Amino acid sequence: MSGRTDADVERGDGRRPVAIPPAQVDRPAVDVDPSAHRLSRQHRSVILVLMVAAFTVILNETVMSVALPVLQVDLGVALSVAQWLTTAYMLTMAVVIPLTGFLIQRVPTRSLFILAMSVFSAGTLAAALAPGFGMLLAARIVQASGTAIMMPLLMTTVMTLVPVARRGLMMGNISIVISVAPALGPTLSGFILGQFGWRAIFLVVLPIALLTLALGARWLVPVADTTRARVDLMSVPFAALGFGGLVYGMASIGEAAEGEAAIPVGVLFTVGGAFLLAFVARQIILQRSDRALLDLRVFRSSVFSISMVAMLLATATMFGAFVLIPLFVQRGLGLDPLQTGLITLPGGLAMGIASPLVGRIYDAHGPRALLLTGALLMSGSLWVLSTVSAATSTALLVGANVAIMVALAATFTPLMTAGLGSLPPRLYSHGSAVLGTLQQVAAASGTAVFVTVVAVAATAAGSDTTEATGTIAGVRAAFRVAAVVSLVLIPAVLLVRKPTSAAPSGVLAH
């Protein structure tokens, strides 16, 4: 571990070095004066800017959930093709995020932030000007390349600066941001689609992104030492082809069901699996000399490993709900995009309200009761949604969605806090990268699988059925699959416990 307790870093304007005081050393809450857990004003400013950036990029990610049916008609593509606007976005993040563990340790915080937000802003402008589906898809990939850096950067910064006794509360505050954005996304998207068309969605996000970029360039400073490590060039294509092949295979199941798959699904899974194994083997070799692109020693922590498995399951079911509810409401019940957004809005707001309370409960009592409650509530809500029909009321949809979002608040904050908190500080950036990578793979896979189930079930309903009837049958089948998956989450969360000790949060070990 480094003998330094202060990080000598350049100023935000790059002219003179300043010393950022470390966070207080982690100790059990009962042994420490509460004043010792206060963050400095500078640390709070750093976290605030990163939270605003996270809100911006997540808002951009979620506006597509309502826009997909509109884009499908306007651009003249099948649903299995249109869903690539969300799947490719998440897939790109899954490919880029493994790089962030290295980037966070190699590039100063301010420089990395400016790079990420500049790329995101350029992609947003390109999306607004896209003449057709191909250019729009490419622009979404550029956006995702910037987004991929932001969440691991935020999580690593929080774990580095915030003492153990306040991490649950801070993660709860972060959950407000990452839940309000998905809540506003569909509603904002629905309103804009109804009034101005889909291009205006990106024109609304662009000024927010540029303002966030300006604030970060003004306020951000590095929060930890950087290293001179070099990126392993072999690991990058291994990760891209490994994660990319698997998720592409998932998405292609739907295209295969419609007879449109360009590459056999078996080939994609085989190639993806082979390259993913090569990536893992390469990282195991490189981490012996601390040169891994993604250090897999994070999985030596049983708490981290179990938390990641539970996070995979919860994320897959969450993104299934994000896609299925708007699809059911618009194509099954015939409601417009704005009405769809208003149905999903209360759930996100409820998650935002619940998240700080969840953080406080975690700090005081640990994760187990929260996780079990969240898993049971999520599973019960999905089973209710597996019974939807043309007679289903909007009140039931709103209530079920609120229950799922509250369940996610009770699940995500404890899993992230306990999982990352079980690691030594020198592995925070790699743990954040693993968390982000698995979340995106789960999200992309969940979206692809559930859309595929809808397509297959709708086809099986028969050619003599209407589109609405087929969609309802497909959504009902997809929710049933999600409900079955949620049953596995219940025993998994019972194995997660609160870390009993941690290294000093303000010192980054090397």
Image (cartoon, grey):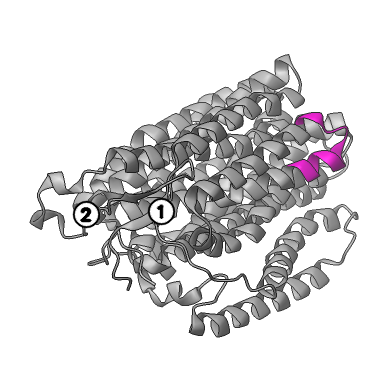
Q: Nearer the viewer, mark 1 or mark 2?
A: 1
Asked if residue 225 is among those painted magenta in the image, a careful observer would answer no
Q: Residue at x 88, y 35 (%)?
A: 132
Amino acid type at circle 2 is Gln
Mark 1 falls on what kind of element?
strand
Quarter of the image with the C terminus in it:
bottom left
Q: Which residues are magenta?
A: 128-139
In percent of width and height, residue 266 lies at 80, 71
Q: CA distance from mark 1 to mark 2?
A: 19 Å
Screen quadrant of the N terminus: bottom left
Q: Is residue 136 magenta?
A: yes
Q: Secondary structure at mark 2?
A: loop
Q: Residue at x 55, y 41 (%)?
A: 385
Q: Residue sitting at 71 percent across and 75 percent down?
A: 275
| Extreme residue toward the top, this view | 195
Residue 212 falls left or right of residue 476: left
Question: Residue 368's quadrant in the figure?
Answer: bottom left
Query: Magenta: predominant secondary structure element?
Result: helix
Q: Nearer the viewer, residue 444 or 202?
A: 202
Q: Which mark is residue 24?
A: 2
- Disc 1 target residue: 9
Q: Position of residue 307 (x, y in %)?
A: 41, 63
Kind of residue at disc 1: Val
